[in-house]
Amino acid sequence: MSKSRVSRRQFLNYTLMGVGGFMASGMLMPMIRFAVDPVLEAGAAGDYIPTSQKVSELTEEPVRVDFTYDQVDGWYESEVTGTAWVYKEGNQIVALSPVCKHLGCTVNWASDKEHPHQFYCPCHGGRYEKNGKNVPGTPPTGPLDEFDVKEQDGLLYLGAAKPNTLV
């Protein structure tokens, strides 16, 4: 036998620490899993969202196209409505985000009587050319974002927004 014996006080200390640690880990594990689980789920970031816009009906004049998609924030799932300005440039379909780069207001096509062939932001007078390039001397700091597009069964599908490649 060893000469160093464990006293009753040390034995109780070790026992209580072990039981307390076991109980704490039993409470912490579900909390950690609850916090980390949504991060580990696979997302569908590369998916295209269907719209009701027929590609055959698109012209050189931008039209507003509304679309809806499911958005998941942690554990809350909601249906979100989005908008894009879509037109044809030759054989290419162009879809621009309506979000102004100045303060995030919504731009409209041909809503300014002085500049009928530009996008106009009514918040602070921002203007964009048809391809989404911001007009110098107006408040926007950059061009409108552009959506990835594809055609499937004659309908327009919109992908993720990305920086504008037309300017």
Image (cartoon, helix red, strand yellow):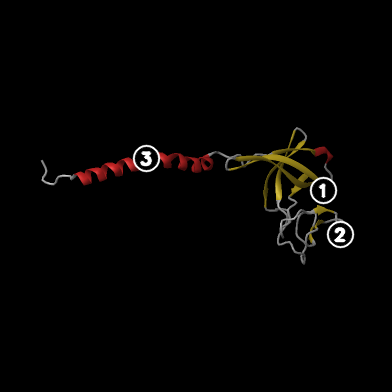
- Can residue 91 be seen here? The reply is no
The residues bearing labels 1 and 3 have C-alpha atoms spaced at a distance of 63 Å
Residue where numbered disc 3 is placed: 23
Determine the residue positioned at 10% across, 45% down.
3
Mark 1 or mark 2, earlier in chain: 1
Give the residue furthest to the bottom. Answer: 137
Mark 1 or mark 3, earlier in chain: 3
Q: Which of these two is toward me, 135 or 167?
A: 135
The residues bearing labels 3 and 2 have C-alpha atoms spaced at a distance of 70 Å
- Element assignment for label 1: loop
Left or right, 44 with reference to 126: left
Disc 1: CA contacts within 10 A as few (<14), some (14-19) or many (>=20): many
Residue where numbered disc 1 is placed: 62
Determine the residue positioned at 22% across, 43% down.
11
- Asked if labels 3 and 1 touch by Cβ distance under 8 angstroms, the answer is no
Left or right, 161 with reference to 135: left
The part of the image, by quadrant, that contains residue 46 is top right
